[in-house]
Amino acid sequence: MPPRATFRDVFAVREFRALWFSEVLSVAGDRLALVALTLLVFHQTGSSLLTAIVYATGYVPWVIGGLFLADVADRRSRRSVMVVCDVVRAVLVAAMAVPHVPLGVLVALLFAATMFEPPFESARAAITPDILQGERYALGTAVFSTTFLVAQTVGAVGGGVAVAFTGVRPALIFLIDAATFVVSGLFVRFGTRARPAAARPETVQPSPLARMRGGFGLLFGDQALRTLLLLAWLVVFYTIPEGVAAPYTARLGGGPIATGVVLASTVFGTAVATPLFTRFVRPRRRLAWMGPLAVLTCGTLVLTALRPGLAVSLVIFSLSAACGAYQIATNTAFVVRVPNERRAQAFGIAKMGLIVGQGAAFVAAGAAAEVVSPAVVIAVGGGIGAIVAVVLTLRWRHVSPPGGRHAAGRRPGHAATSSSSVPLREPG
């Protein structure tokens, strides 16, 4: 049996290091600018509604970008797509630093800049299986997942600290964000090699709507892909505690610090468990545990119906988030099933659905928390998610028989072009 891959093996790959540095810079810079602009709007208007709308501009563009721009990374060189997205975002964010720009223009610039995040992230996700194969891909995905969570947290905290020290004049912060995109583009351009477009021109539908329908047909027309996609989207249920963290801690007598600790517990559990799960659990076993962990990550939240104190609540939220490490198994199984020439679009649609679903779940949870206890809202959401997870687990066992011995040794991303004709293959 060959030695197992390690995180050191992953970071030994020059192209992966370039992508990783690019991801750190892009995510932290995005969050830095979004938090700074949100604080600026609240300072100037005092409106919670306008502040929430501005914060939503960091997410809404994924609906448009995920549907219509993500597949650009299949029809063009993925490296070129990432570099162009970084250049455009750098210019747009730098324009936000111009003195005396009206708030409405700042929000519009942020919206436009965020529109280029879906094609960038789709290209990055689609090119990673070309850089890392087999078990290294799973480890690399764990690194990206953990990095994303940590970079978002650091960027958000950094935005608040920067505004506190510089005053509510975030021009310098916008320039820093623009610089992160410039450096990110340099890492991608000179740290990764050029590859031709994955999709052949003669196979590409000329109409954007036709391409969008084709993407949904690919993901929902294949039972295995559909099951994996829905397993990934379970995140909308087990992240409900984030959406009602403030009222939840208020019911327990806690203040802003307690709210921050609750939010941190959801990130901490995932950030710690994901690399451990990927490194020490073998690929076949990860796939076998995918369904049970999906049930647990939602089902654990049902315990909040017992109205525990803050300390026990933190344990519940951390355990739930830790079980969310199953997403690594979902991701690797998903990528080997999707044809390379449709990979970027598939990732874009998957991420778009996840973000839209989370947004809708947060709104629904917030509305429900006005009527019943936030603890009950979390418990009900977790219970619904657990039931859905059980159904999806049973469906997965039907479409992917246990063992999957035919899967061994396959490289991620090399599924046949007709996904419905090929059984799911597990990487590594």
Image: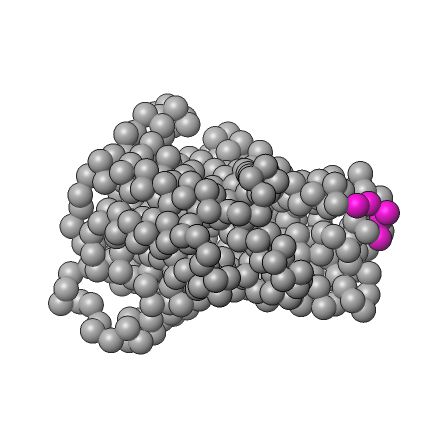
Residue beneath the point at 17% across and 67% down: 203
- The answer to if 296 sits in the magenta stretch is no
The image position of residue 248, as x and y in percent, is: 78, 53
- Considering only vertical position in the picture, is 198 above or below 7? below
Horizontally, residue 15 falls left or right of residue 281, namely left
Residue beneath the point at 48% across and 30% down: 279
Q: Which residues are magenta?
A: 251-255
The image's colouring method is one colour
- Considering only vertical position in the picture, is 248 above or below 180? below
| Image quarter of the C terminus | top left
Q: Is residue 370 visible?
A: yes
Relative to the observer, which residue lies in front, 233 or 207?
207
Residue beneath the point at 58% across and 34% down: 272
The image position of residue 250, as x and y in percent, is: 81, 51
Q: Is residue 141 visible?
A: no
Relative to the observer, which residue lies in front, 13 or 84?
84
The image position of residue 242, as x and y in percent, is: 66, 52
Question: How many numbered callouts?
Answer: 0
Helix, strand or loop for the magenta stretch, by majority: loop
Horizontally, residue 250 falls left or right of residue 362, namely right
| Image quarter of the N terminus | top left
The image position of residue 284, as x and y in percent, is: 45, 40
Residue beneath the point at 22% across and 36% down: 190
- Considering only vertical position in the picture, is 61 above or below 179? below
Horizontally, residue 260 falls left or right of residue 424, namely right
Quadrant in which residue 55 is drawn? bottom right
Name, please, the residue furthest toward the front: 100
Quadrant in which residue 337 is drawn? bottom left
